[in-house]
Image (cartoon, rainbow, N blue to C red):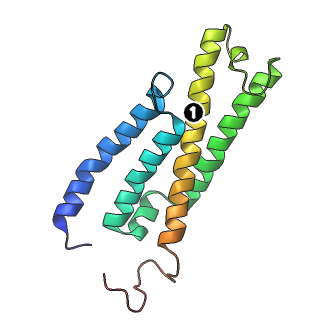
Amino acid sequence: MREHTVLRVVTKVLIAPIILFALYVQFHGDYSPGGGFQAGVVFAAAIILYALIFGLAEARRAVSPNLLRITGALGALIFAGTGVYAMLRGGNFLDYDYLAHDAIHGQHYGLLLVEFGVGLTVVSVITSIFYVFAGRGRRNDDEQPPGDAR
């Protein structure tokens, strides 16, 4: 892919707006369609686009599998922690009314936290799945398998 200069330049221009749109979907999801899952998929699409144009090894350097493991676990912990915190405050699991001094603020905080946790988990899992399938059968990311005409 090194000889495709136009694709590389267009990708560099597009990745920032894709990530910005993912953030918009993430934080605007409690008022309109969208939320953590959709934002995670859009964000993962930006990483996958980067990997398709610049190569899997370069994408793994930019977003390492170890970082994906940490953010995936952190997202699940944020989701579950929000529910457990509500239980510790006297409510049911994910009963947002108990997360703040009044129910309206609690609903707002709960939605933001849960959707943020879902978004982190989704982007981590989808990107990890792509890394596994894209790197399948390769001994080393820098060497080409026999018969692979890039």
Q: Is residue 53 left or right of residue 62?
A: left
* Residue 105 locus on image (x, y percent): 60, 12
Label 1 element class: helix
Taking 71 as reference, is 33 above or below it? above
* Residue 92 locus on image (x, y percent): 80, 23
Residue to which mark 1 is pinned: 115
Of all residues, the one furthest to the front in this rendering is 33
**Residue for point 59% across, 40% down:** 118
Q: Is residue 4 left or right of residue 143?
A: left
**Residue for point 43% across, 87% down:** 145
How packed mark 1 is, by other alpha carbons closer than 10 Å (few <14, some 14-19, many 20 or more), is: many
* Residue 109 locus on image (x, y percent): 60, 21
Image quadrant in which you'd find residue 62: bottom left
Asked whether 85 or 64 is in front, the reply is: 85
Taking 139 as reference, is 135 above or below it? above
Q: Which quadrant holds the C terminus?
A: bottom left
**Which three-letter amino acid code belongs to the residue tagged 1?**
Glu
**Residue for point 42% across, 46% down:** 42
Asked whether 19 or 30 is in front, the reply is: 30
Asked whether 73 or 26 is in front, the reply is: 26
Q: Is residue 67 left or right of residue 18?
A: right
Of all residues, the one furthest to the top in this rendering is 102
Taking 46 as reference, is 2 above or below it? below
Of all residues, the one furthest to the left in this rendering is 6
Image quadrant in which you'd find residue 67: bottom right
Q: Is residue 97 left or right of residue 65?
A: right
Asked whether 104 or 67 is in front, the reply is: 104
Q: Which quadrant holds the N terminus?
A: bottom left
Taking 101 as reference, is 25 above or below it? below
* Residue 85 locus on image (x, y percent): 75, 26
**Residue for point 30% across, 42% down:** 17
Q: How many marks?
A: 1
